[in-house]
Image: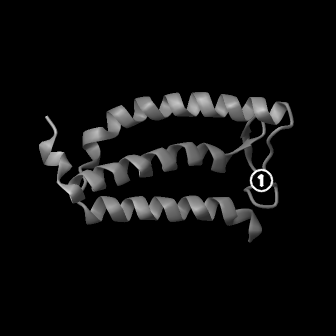
Amino acid sequence: MAHLHYLGVLLFIGICAVGVTLGFKIRVPGFWKTFLFTDIAILVIYLAWDIWAISKRNWYFDHNQILSGLLINKVPLEEILFFIIVPLTTIVTYKALLKLTGWESKRP
C-alpha cells in the first residue's frame, strides 16, 4: 500500500477542493479558461525543473511510494497530477475566502 501514499494525499486534496466548491457554491466554469492557461504555464515550468533536477540527481521519487508508471523523463503520474490539483485547490480556496469575507462583492 505504500505505493499509493502520494496518490492518497492528492486524492485527499482533491476531495477537499470538491467539498469547498460545493460548500461555498463556487461557480467553477467561471474560471476554467484562466485556470487552464495558467496551469499549463505551471506544468511547463515545474516539469522542466523536475526533469532537470532528476537528470542532475538532485531530485528523485521514492519508487516505493508512487505508482510504477513514469511518464516524462522519470517523472511519475502523481507529480503531474500534483501540478494540476494543488493550483486548482488554491484557486478554489481563494474564491471561497473571497465569499467568506465578503470581499468578492467589493471587487470592481
| Quadrant placement of the N terminus | bottom right
**Quadrant in which residue 58 is drawn:** top right
Residue beneath label 1, please?
68
| Closer to us: 16 or 1 | 16
Above/below status of 13 relative to 40: below
Q: Secondary structure at mark 1?
A: loop
| Quadrant placement of the C terminus | top left
Above/below status of 84 relative to 48: below
- Sort mark 1 into few (<14), some (14-19) or many (20+) by Cα contacts within 10 Å: few
Q: Residue at x 83, y 31 (%)?
A: 55
Q: Residue at x 64, y 50 (%)?
A: 78
Q: Is residue 98 left or right of residue 43?
A: left
Q: Residue at x 69, y 31 (%)?
A: 49
Q: Is residue 107 left or right of residue 87?
A: left
**Quadrant in which residue 75 is drawn:** top right
Q: Residue at x 25, y 61 (%)?
A: 24
